[in-house]
Amino acid sequence: MLEAYSKVVIPEMMKVHGYKNVMQVPRLKKIVINIGVSEARENIKVIDLASDELGAITGQKPQVRRAKKSISNFKLRQGLPIGLRVTLRGSMMYEFFDRLVNIALPRVRDFKGVDPKAFDGHGNYNMGLTEQYIFTEVNLEKSDKTRGMNITIVTSARTDAEAKSLLEMMGIPFKKTEKKP
């Protein structure tokens, strides 16, 4: 994917957006994957199962995120583990991006493309997945339940239009928006 970016995407972006220097072309900075594990309040072993699955998907050991404050309405105590996070950079990031676009997203049921409105205004893209089973690395026999995850793709693009153009050229299928007459 990194090779395709340097040989295909950079020249195309320079032509489309009129960049004069190669260093002006937006690129992927990092990909952050988050999983919220709220059931860990009752059963702490759920964190280990979710950590193993996220580690298999990303190839990197997840960081356990803990509650910052106690919230009585959610039966949450300060310091309890409630989520997992992995930050991917460099070659691991491009390898995960390749698997996400070419293997995982086509396995989503009734997939029509990802939402083109999920940009944050600064050139970063957020995508929510409802189940981890779309990744082939997850062992279905060991998994106890489906877990959703949030994937944030951080780019160096200044605007959402540049970021969308970059991600389209790298292979992310966006939904086609129909214009109303």
Image (cartoon, rainbow, N blue to C red):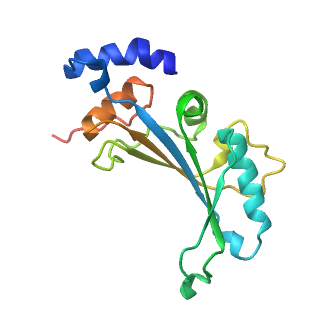
The residue drawn where x is 31% and y is 23% is: 23
Can you tell which quarter of the image residue 41 is in?
bottom right
The residue at the far left in this view is 181
Q: Residue 36 at x, y = what percent?
A: 59, 62
Q: Nearer the viewer, residue 62 or 141?
A: 62
Number of residue marks: 0
Residue 65 at x, y percent in the picture:
61, 63
Task: Decide if residue 97 is on the left or right side of residue 116.
Answer: right
Tell me the residue at 40%/13% (across/down): 8
84 to the left or right of 29: right
**Which corner quadrant of the image does residue 35 belong to?**
bottom right
Image quarter of the C terminus? top left
Residue in front for this viewpoint, 110 or 62: 62
Q: Nearer the viewer, residue 69 or 177?
A: 69
- At a point 83% along the width and 50% down the height, the residue shown is 142
Which residue is situated farthest in the bottom direction here? 72
Vertical order, 40 against 173 (above or below)? below
Q: Position of residue 2 (x, y in %)?
A: 50, 21
**Nearer to the camera, 152 or 168:** 152
Residue at image coords 19%, 19% = 18
Residue 79 placement (x, y as % from top left): 63, 75
Give the farthest residue toward the right: 141
Left or right: residue 52 versus residue 172 is right
